[in-house]
């Protein structure tokens, strides 16, 4: 569930830890996150994520964990950053050989995949909660390399 949220919403580690159950709006298919400088943003959630969240909340409820935070430990305390890093690193180790395996890698992947599928930079900026476009432009490097490769392999004079 943690990895799915990082990848499908592009949220930050601190945003994930502070997510509350009532931040999820199943009617509007959105999730509300509180970002840097207490800046709130509303993110769309996919049908797949919505279904997984419903399953997760059902399991959480059956376990007797009726805390306001979306993610809590069995001791009913909310998650902490080091634990989330450990979880993400563990699962990413199962599927990739990249050296850096962190929540931010999933956020970066979210942004890169959106850009590669044609999303405009300004929309990605809003989804990520960046205050300036300059912060979002770091994700264009991979796309520029991809465009060069497409040009080289597809253009008659490439």
Image: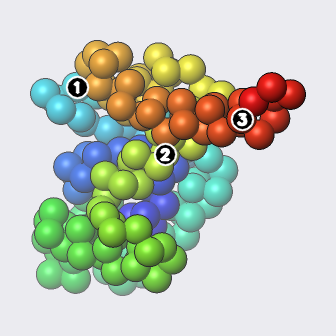
Which badge, 1 or 3, comes first in the chain's sequence? 1
Q: Which mark is residue 119?
A: none
Q: Which quadrant, please, contains the N terminus?
A: bottom left
- Residue hosting label 3: 152
At horizontal 64% and vertical 57% (from top left) the residue drawn is 48
Between label 1 and label 3, give the one nearer the viewer.
Answer: 3
Tell whether 153 sits left or right of 125: right
Q: Please identify the quarter of the rendering in which residue 80 is found.
A: bottom left
The local secondary structure at tag 1 comes to: loop
Disc 2/disc 3 C-alpha distance (Å):
26 Å
| 11, above or below 83, in the image | above
- Residue hosting label 1: 39
Disc 1/disc 3 C-alpha distance (Å):
42 Å
The local secondary structure at tag 2 comes to: helix
Q: Residues within 10 Å of mark 3 (few under 14, many from 20)?
A: few
| 121, above or below 27, in the image | above
**Residue 28 showing in the rendered view:** no
Q: Which quadrant, please, contains the C terminus?
A: top right
Disc 1/disc 2 C-alpha distance (Å):
20 Å
- Residue hosting label 2: 110
Tell whether 20 sits left or right of 10: left
Query: Residue 154 location, x and y as percent?
Result: 81, 35
Query: Residue 134 location, x and y as percent?
Result: 30, 19
Mark 1 in CB contact with mark 3 (< 8 angstroms): no
Question: Foreground: 65 or 12?
Answer: 12
Q: Please identify the quarter of the rendering in which residue 64 is found.
A: bottom left
Query: Residue 71 location, x and y as percent?
Result: 29, 65
At horizontal 43% and vertical 64% (from top left) the residue drawn is 3
């Amino acid at each position: 569930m943690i990895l799915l949220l990082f990848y499908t919403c592009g949220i930050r580690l601190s945003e994930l830890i502070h997510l509350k159950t009532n931040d999820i709006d199943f009617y509007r298919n959105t999730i509300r996150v509180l970002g840097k400088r207490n800046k709130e943003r509303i993110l769309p959630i996919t049908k797949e994520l919505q279904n997984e969240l419903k399953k997760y909340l059902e399991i959480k409820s059956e376990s007797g964990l009726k805390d306001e935070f979306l993610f809590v430990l069995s001791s009913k305390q909310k998650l902490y950053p080091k634990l989330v890093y450990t979880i993400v690193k563990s699962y990413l180790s199962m599927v990739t050989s990249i050296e850096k395996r962190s929540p931010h890698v999933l956020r970066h992947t979210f942004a890169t995949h959106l850009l590669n599928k044609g999303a405009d930079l300004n929309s990605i900026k809003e989804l990520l909660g960046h205050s300036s476009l300059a912060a979002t432009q770091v994700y264009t490097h991979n796309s520029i390399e991809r465009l060069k490769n497409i040009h080289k392999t597809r253009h008659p004079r490439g």
